Image: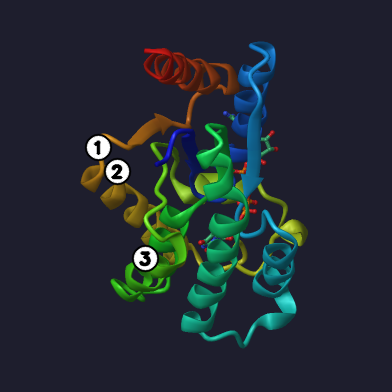
Amino acid sequence: MKKGVFISVEGPDGSGKSTQIRNIRRFFADREIDIVFTREPGGTAIGERIREIILDKACAEMDNMTEAMLYAAARAQHVAQIIKPALAEGKIVICDRFVDSSIAYQGYGRNLGESVTVINDYAIAGCMPDITFLLKMDPKIGRRRIKQDQQDRLEQEQDEFHLRTFEGYLELEKKYPDRIVGIDATGSIEQIKADIYEKLEEVLKSVAE
Ligand code: ADP
Ligand code: TYD
């Protein structure tokens, strides 16, 4: 039986996800609560090697389904090797992106639809986040924050791809209102941090009960 707490963080590229993840890690460190922090694609030695292939700009010819399956393959390893064992030990797991990224980017962005849910059902094997923070921001604004020479293969996609991806996130938020906590990511770093901390306090309270 799962005992730990699984928290994922999602959002379009440039939405401030890395900045807020630093704040989330600080939230737990300040309270001397141990967490397992991990990320996707990656989180394991095998997953990090898959990440290099997926994000490499030299892999321009990559087929969309190959891309979706590589993300799912990295995720299967991640769930089996890191996430499930940590949750079974009762730990708090914070994950920078998880399956919602695949639904949004590959399902909506790449127009692969339901097939992405199907392949990921095998990858996650019933392991879903308890809480997902979704940083909501127009992807056009987010992408302006990322320097062009620092963009990876996904980030350098056209605006239409990123808009479809964001639509996907909004659909997921509507579909899973109990799990997905939408955060307005257009405000100041401090305001966004305060919104996230408020929810994290609630999560800690519910765990303690
Ligand atoms: P992501 O991980 O989502 O790509 P980052 O956290 O790396 O985003 O942020 C991208 C850029 O935007 C960084 O230069 C960061 O300092 C800046 N940034 C992050 N949050 C905000 C915010 N709320 N307002 C303005 N700039 C921000
Ligand atoms: P990430 O390292 O989170 O990039 P950043 O923090 O700079 O936004 O993610 C790398 C890219 O991979 C990002 O563009 C989103 C994409 N991605 C998918 O398309 N599908 C997935 O399942 C995951 C996990 C990420």
Q: Is residue 9 above or below residue 78?
A: above
Residue wearing tag 1: 177
* Picture coordinates of residue 19, whole percent (x, y): 65, 32
What's the amino acid at mark 3? Asp
To which quarter of the image does residue 32 belong? top right
Which one is closest to the eye, mark 3 or mark 2?
Answer: 3
To which quarter of the image does residue 115 belong? bottom left
The single residue placed furthest to the left in the displayed view is 175
* Picture coordinates of residue 67, whole percent (x, y): 54, 77
Residue 173, disc: 2
Q: Is residue 152 above or below residue 54?
A: above
Regarding mark 2 in the picture, which secondary structure is present there?
A: helix
Q: Quadrant of the N terminus?
A: top left
Looking at the image, residue 93 sits to the left or right of residue 206; the answer is right
Residue wearing tag 3: 121
Regarding mark 1 in the picture, which secondary structure is present there?
A: loop
For marks 1 and 3, give the CA distance: 20 Å
For marks 3 and 2, give the CA distance: 19 Å
Q: Residues within 10 Å of mark 3 (few under 14, many from 20)?
A: some
**Residue shown at the point (42%, 43%) measured from the top left:** 129
Q: Quadrant of the C terminus?
A: top left
Cβ atoms at labels 2 and 1 below 8 Å apart: yes
Q: Residues within 10 Å of mark 1 (few under 14, many from 20)?
A: few
